Image (cartoon, grey):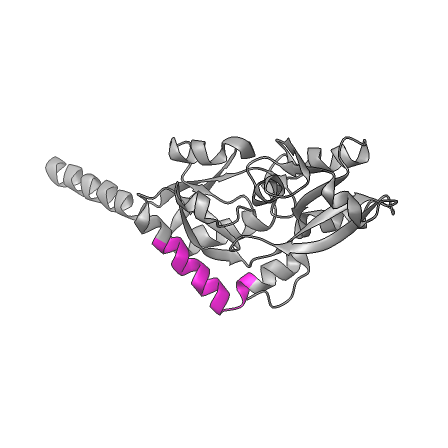
Amino acid sequence: MRKLVIAALVTAVSAGSAFAQQVIRMGTEGAYEPYNFINDKGEIDGFERELGDKLCEIAGYTCEWVKNDWDTIIPNLLSGNYDTIMAGMSITDERKEKIDFTQNYFPPAASAYVALAGADDSVINGNIAAQVNTIQSAYIAESDATLIEFAIADETVAAVRNGEADAVFADKDYLQKIVDESNGELKFVGEDVQLGGGVGMGVRKSDTEMRDKFDAAITQLKGDGTLNAMIEKWFNIKDAF
């Protein structure tokens, strides 16, 4: 009888292990609202938190969120500190040399310049603030303007406000709320610029099975309208896909 009880316990434990969900650590910056930010409770929040949790649910994973500074977000993925990047990261050929991406979960979007209210369009050829290691900083580096890089996106806007930079160049979706809430202090200048192939989830090249599961989950959310509803909630953009 004792042997039968032990055997039953072993079987139960084995069954439990078989159905245990794999934990996937989701790396994000937590400083790029509304994509990702830290809320009043000190928790990672935003569009990518909501979407990432839903993607994990569909793919059969358990999510754990890890905050990491933007300038080391790819190296720390490759070092194994987390398993994915969901941080408003645009899909580019340069990044694809180092990591893989799922399909985009946010379409290619405009980048834009923001300056003080009294500025004119000529400031886009002056001193331009951009976040380091972004498609925007790479674009400015190849232009006639002078690039001033900052580690955190909020610092680029602060540089315009304190006169350190003539304008900031960043995702328009990120800048829109800042301009709207500036009480007329800031405004968009120049023309919008289309960059990148949309925002996707970054993964290590070796994690093909995980990438494919997340890719299938994104396809499902695009197909049933859930992703469009999330984008409208966080960005006020209708029918993104």
Does residue 114 appear anywhere in the picture? Answer: yes
**Quarter of the figure that contains the N terminus:** top left
**Quarter of the figure that contains the C terminus:** bottom right
76 in relation to 33, above or below = above
Q: Position of residue 209 (x, y in %)?
A: 31, 50
Specify whether 111 is left or right of 225: right
| Residue 22, quarter of picture | top left
Q: Where is residue 59 in the image (x, y as percent from the top left)?
A: 39, 54
> Measuring 64% from the left and 66% from the top, which residue is drawn there?
238
> Measuring 74% from the left and 45% from the top, which residue is drawn there?
124
226 in relation to 150, above or below = below
Q: What stretch is highlighted in magenta?
A: 212-227
Is the stretch drawn in magenta largely helix, strand or loop? helix
| Residue 80, quarter of picture | top left
89 in relation to 223, above or below = above
142 in relation to 236, above or below = above
Q: Nearer the viewer, residue 91 or 44?
A: 91
Number of on-image labels: 0
Specify whether 5 is left or right of 186: left
> Measuring 77% from the left and 50% from the top, which residue is drawn there?
189
Does residue 234 appear anywhere in the picture? Answer: no
Q: Position of residue 32 (x, y in %)?
A: 63, 42
Q: Nearer the viewer, residue 108 or 65?
A: 108
Q: Where is residue 193 in the image (x, y as percent from the top left)?
A: 64, 54
* The magenta stretch spans residue 91: no
